[in-house]
Image: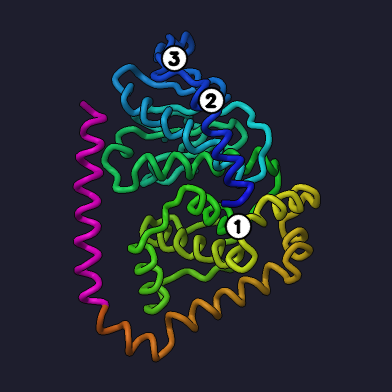
Amino acid sequence: MSRLFRAARVLALALAALAPASPAGAQDPATGGLVRDLAPLPVTIRYENRYGRVADKVTDICRAEIPRIAAELGLAHITPIDIVVTSDARGYDRTLEEGLPTWGVAFAVLEEQRILVDVNKATRAYNSLEEVVPHELSHLLLYQRVPRVRFPIWFLEGLAQWQAREWSMVDGWQLATSVWNGSAPPLRDMTYSYPAEESRAQGAYRVSYAAFRELFTAGGFERLPAFLAEVDRRRNFEGAFQDFWGFSLADYGAYFQDDLERRYRSRLFALQEGPLFGFAALLFIAVIARHLIRSRRKFRQLEE
């Protein structure tokens, strides 16, 4: 176990010892709902009384995951974070409505250090709160670690998926098939925007994860804090990338694209894997169905 992860574990245990067993919400005079303080973490959760069980789940996730996520980023001091559990995340702040995808479950508002959790979508979606809350926390804490630096969206989303531990065998299979059939978006098209349509956006997420993971696989993820420190020092992602890795961002994009296509679009892969896709599809559908049933059962308990 590395010193980085050992430190995160010690911090998490210390915070758990200091935290109350089941925090109660106080009345929020601004909204009429409830507000919960997660001290010693600088986090507040705002919610309606009927969403108390969802707030409990978000509380547990924050206490367990924030110390780890911060340690992985090399963030020593966490500034206040506001989490809103609402039935209409898109309508919570009308100034944000047009920029939020209709299919999203939770959203990070970086400048305000706020996460909006759409409780209706969260209790129906296959991607559970255990994944979406750490994902959005990663965005907020990265912004705290390196404020006001423009990152490529593939790096942001790849990092958030890695920190949320979202990757699965299903994602790996879907990435392989999308590259094989030519539907996977190239990395160069994911610098500052994602496709708007959900299925294409999900494909972009998978490519982003693969690109982020490939970048750190050789040297180890322990290098992430040092790289972010270089980005913070330079105040420029592209320049820091060149200095830290020894090759340009464009060169990495070209290398990654060639490597991805070599692995998943070769004739050998098509001959060996293509005929098996039908069987694999049935197998993965069974896995997904089992996961959906378990998720719905779990979130039905939250709604009761």
In the image, taking residue 128 as reference, residue 18 lies left or right, namely right
Q: Look at discs 2 and 1 and give the one toward the viewer.
A: 1
Which numbered disc covers residue 221?
1
Q: Which amino acid does label 3 sit on?
A: Thr
**In the rendered structure, does residue 75 fall within the stretch colored magenta?**
no
Q: Residue at x 61, y 51 (%)?
A: 2
Quarter of the image that includes the C terminus: top left
In the image, taking residue 191 as reference, residue 244 lies left or right, namely right
Q: Distance between the residues labelled 2 and 3?
A: 17 Å
Query: What's the magenta bit mostly, secondary-structure-wise?
Result: helix
Q: Count numbered badges in the picture.
A: 3
Specify which label sits upstream in the sequence, 2 or 3: 3
Q: Residue at x 59, y 57 (%)?
A: 155
Please indicate, yes or no, whether residue 236 appears anywhere in the rendered image. Answer: yes
Instruction: Please state which of residues 66 and 115 is positioned toward the viewer in this rendering.
Output: 66
Q: Look at discs 2 and 3 and give the one toward the viewer.
A: 2
In the picture of the structure, the residue carrying the numbered disc 3 is 31
Q: Which amino acid does label 1 sit on?
A: Phe
Relative to 109, residue 30 above or below = above
Q: Quadrant of residue 180?
A: bottom left
Which structural element holds mark 3?
loop
Q: Which residues lie in the magenta part?
A: 277-304
In the picture of the structure, the residue carrying the numbered disc 2 is 43
Which structural element holds mark 2?
strand
